[in-house]
Image (cartoon, rainbow, N blue to C red):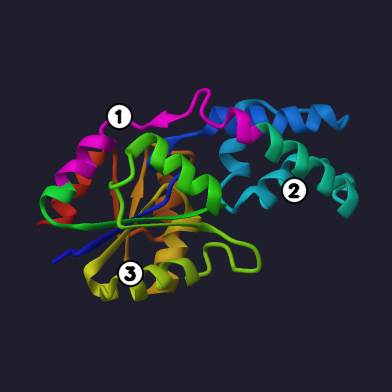
Amino acid sequence: MTKLIIFDLDGTLINSLADLAASANHALRACGFPVHPPGSYRYFAGNGVTRLLERALPEGARDEETFRRIFEEFTRYYTLHRADLTAPYPGIADLLEALRARGTRLAVASNKYHSATVAMTRLYFGDGAFDLVRGHVEDTPLKPHPAIVLEILAETGVAPGETLYVGDSNVDVQTAKNAGVRSIGVTWGFRERQELQDAGANFIVDSPAGILPIAFP
């Protein structure tokens, strides 16, 4: 029986691609660098803001001082504009309601910095939607390191075999493997089905409703 479901945030619960792209392009433009088409950020995202900005910068401009300027500009702009175009994916609110009605514990584990993860989940899903919300904090490893998932398991007291991890990328699938939990790859997010298949997702679904029969067969 599934007692706990852990969700990735960006590309899984919310479609934040347009605001991430706009914020990164603003930072690049402000610092005198070329910008990228919004679709490119599908592949830049997934390993936290640091890696997203590193990938967006020209290869020869990734020195410490340049990155500091880009990061500060991105953070300032994204804090003000992170909800301009972002929204939950269709069907997510209904899925969360159905899972809560069954008594399933719910959590979020994101590589987005923690304060933004908390703010975004609260904005789009309210205060009581999740039992635990965890984002990245300084000096802790990012996914696919399993630390964030293992922390959630320890705090909830749920065993890995009673847990599902839901995400949209190979980073998420590998995170689940590293933590010893089953993975569900979702095809409505930032990456393609083939990436999820190649990563070895235990299940792949095309809509949020497809998660229910996996959690409760």
Answer with left or right where residue 160 lies relative to residue 141: left
Please say whether residue 40 is visible from this viewpoint: no
Identify the magenta region.
Answer: 78-98
Would you call the spot at circle 3 few (<14 residues within 10 Å), some (14-19), or many (20 or more)?
A: many
Name of the residue lying farthest toward the front: 127
Residue 210 magenta-drawn? no
Residue 160: where, in percent of width, then height?
29, 74
Label of residue 90 in the image:
1
User: What amino acid type should be assigned to the residue bearing mark 3?
Assistant: Val
Residue found 25% across the figure and 33% down from its top: 91
Q: Earlier in the sequence, mark 1 or mark 3?
A: 1
Q: Secondary structure at mark 3?
A: loop
Answer with left or right where residue 124 lies relative to residue 159: right
| Rendered position, 89 above or below 144 | above
Residue bearing the label numbered 3: 181
Label of residue 54 in the image:
2
Name of the residue lying farthest toward the top: 84
User: What amino acid type should be assigned to the residue bearing mark 1?
Assistant: Pro
Q: Earlier in the sequence, mark 2 or mark 1?
A: 2
Answer with left or right where residue 90 lies relative to residue 116: left
User: What amino acid type should be assigned to the residue bearing mark 2?
Assistant: Glu
Q: CA distance from mark 1 to mark 3?
A: 26 Å
Residue 82 magenta-drawn? yes
